[in-house]
Image (tube, rainbow, N blue to C red):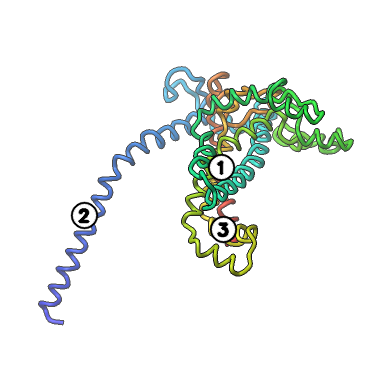
Amino acid sequence: MTTQQKTATVTARTGRNRFARQQAAAGWLFTLPALVLVALFVGLPVLMAAWVSVSGWRGRGSPFSGDVPFVGLDNYQTLLAGGGLATQDLGTALRNNLWYVLLVVPTQTVVALLLAVAVNQRALKGRGFFRTAFYFPSVTSSVAIVVVFLFLFGASGAVNQVIGWFGVNGPNWFADPRGVLHLLLGVVGVDSGGALADHDVLGISLWEWLAGPSVAMSALIILAVFTTSGTFMLLFLAGLQNISAEVGEAATVDGASAWQRLRYVTVPMLRPVLFTVLTLGLVGTWQVFDQVYTGTQGGPAKTTITPAYLSYTASFEQQQWGQGAAIAFLLFFIIVVLTVVQRAFLRDNR
């Protein structure tokens, strides 16, 4: 290579590097406003909450003033191992929310998928109407829907009227603290937990952990599925429209039934969308607050309190801001762990 060629190569390389640096600088310049906003409205509050969770701040004055004591992990210890009312409330809230998550996430996912498949059919007339109708609860105020559900599931509401047609006396839904599984076990003669009642986790006996959602929580579960399925239907619908029609036609030619096409063709091709729906559902259900605050205020007998609602009451009503922030971080930890586990599970099954 001659000297002129080497010089030209070095010059070209220098030009490319300068262009790359300019591109990088332009990218940082355009994203800087967003980064500043995220740091200001997300990062800074998280750091402040982290400090509050290890302090004895009672909501008066600045949490960073010199008279606010540093208590280390005392708030976390009180919640997780204190053995008092705070531990029992946290255990009750986690039990309630766990049953809520276990029932809402799979149900809303299946309902949303079936709705998306139904409104994606070319033969269906008025598809736009049905898509709008199914999505409408998602854009309606959750407070308004809760109020409607309070009427529907009242002691003399429409739901109990329908149940009465079959000769069954419906419960007073939002005032019944009995666990659904305990009720079902009571039908077959199992009314006590035996040894399960002698062991407890977070102040709640194993028998109480297995009580299932209370009747009141069951109504909130139905409400959640009703309001969120439309949103996830849109995600599945977008995924379905990215699947070529030839794929389904090829499966039909091979003799696959409608169920087999859904099970072995459609669902595997929707795996990225399915992961998104499950993740959003998991995060949303662990953070449930507005339905509880509007509908039941944690009652009856604390069978509808959730960690998010417990964090609110500990902070704003009991002025235990350290414990409230600690509950929020425990909830964050639970969501992160479950999301990682869910991601690993879906990845292993590819």
| Residue 58 at x, y percent in the picture | 51, 20
Residue 161 position (above or below residue 22): above
Q: Quadrant of the C terminus?
A: bottom right
From the image, tell me which residue sits under label 2: 22
Amino acid type for the residue under numbered disc 3: Thr
Q: Residue at x 63, y 40 (%)?
A: 104
Residue 142 position (above or below residue 263): above
Amino acid type for the residue under numbered disc 2: Gln
From the image, tell me which residue sits under label 3: 266
Residue at far bottom of view = 1
Q: CA distance from mark 2 to mark 3?
A: 44 Å
* Left or right: 267 as drawn, with respect to 154: left
N-terminal label among 1 and 3: 3
Amino acid type for the residue under numbered disc 1: Gly
| Residue 289 at x, y percent in the picture | 56, 29
Secondary structure at badge 3 equals: helix
Q: CA distance from mark 1 to mark 3?
A: 20 Å
N-terminal label among 2 and 1: 2
Secondary structure at badge 2 equals: helix
Mark 2 neighbour class, 10 Å CA radius: few under 14, some 14 to 19, many 20 or more: few
* Circles 2 and 1 in contact, beta carbons < 8 Å: no
Q: Residue at x 50, y 23 (%)?
A: 57
Residue 23 position (above or below residue 146): below
Q: Quadrant of the N terminus?
A: bottom left
Q: Quadrant of residue 187?
A: top right
